[in-house]
Amino acid sequence: MMKQNKPYLIAEIGVNFYDTAKIMEIKPLDAAKLYIKKAADSGVDCVKFQSYKANTLASKNSPAYWDTTKESTKSQYELFSKFDGFYEDDYLELSKYAHSLDVDFTSTPFDYTSADYLEKMVDFYKISSSDLSNLPFISYIGAKGKPVVLSTGASYISEIDEAVRTLQDSGCEDISLLHCVLSYPTSSQNANLNIIKGLKKIYPKLKIGYSDHVMPDECMTTLTTAYLLGAEIIEKHFTLDKKLKGNDHYHAGDPKDFKRAVDNFKLVNKLLGSEDKTVLDCEIIPRKEARRSLVLTRNIKQGETIETDDLIAKRPGTGISPKYTNIVIGRKALVPLNEDEILTWDKV
């Protein structure tokens, strides 16, 4: 079961901790735990890793599809081979550690073996955009009865439909779709955040979110905008140092970025408030003082009839409202009235 925070924020740690382990000269497992702790301190709801073995994920001839000026490795197989050292016991330890910090845990499985051993550890399955057309694998995961979050990068609606139907046919009842652009990094003009609204219209019964690869600005505008457009789940790569070379550091957010995003979400939730229009407690006094009442333009004797020209609408609104002007006109003053006096019903 996933937390119910709005939005649900996933720190995609992926395999970034391997580079940090080298820099800090610590074990990868210790670096992974450090990432979890820093992400938890930043206020995320979930930490996510990636579970794979290079020899079952990519052909040795698979070319790079990322920005090679940021990550110079030319082969997918070569890159993935650098970061596939974890096994079932490692992920189990990370899962327990994350849960001890009251943070959800998941890891994207890229093969059937990892899908099996992750079942007892993850709060939900995350399926990568790269496996959206891998329908047998999607069906296998969907049949496990856990919630599934599916990224939709580089796909057509017809392909998303196939994947969603496959999950539903396998018995999966809790499906979320993440708008995603499969480009590392994604330029601002290619973010296409309005697709979030489009997916919500097409799939009104599913939770819709956003998986981000845009390089973060200091205000975390991209994630905040995605939330304002209706993203219920937001995923972004997480690093402890955006200046580290290789893999996903260069388009990730660091703890400071994630903390700012969380603060933005909290502020947005305060700003959005309720859809029910009513008078707020903070408006009760201003409502009375800033509205208008019927006020006399001259002195009027007791028993004299009040005419149209005798009235003007002025603040405060503690007397007879101007909407009752036609009712007041033609009535007689019950007591002597002075110019600029606020009319009340006991006076006419």
Image (spheres, helix red, strand yellow):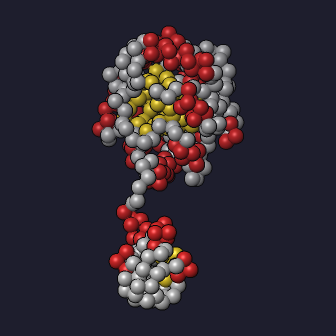
**Quarter-of-image position of residue 115:** top left
Q: Nearer the viewer, residue 117 or 26?
A: 117
> Is 135 drawn above or below residue 76 in the view shown?
above
Front position in the image: 330 or 181 = 330
Residue 259 in percent (x, y) is at 46, 50
Q: Position of residue 71 (x, y in %)?
A: 64, 33
Q: Residue at x 31, y 32 (%)?
A: 96
Q: Quadrant of the N terminus?
A: top left
What residue do we see at 65% from left, 31% from top? Answer: 183
Residue drawn at point x = 51 percent, y = 88 percent: 298
Q: Residue at x 64, y 37 (%)?
A: 191
One can see residue 78 in this view: no
**Residue 204 percent location from the top left of the image:** 50, 28
Q: Residue furthest top?
A: 136
> Left or right: where does residue 58 sit relative to residue 104?
right
Residue 27 point in image, percent of width and height: 42, 35
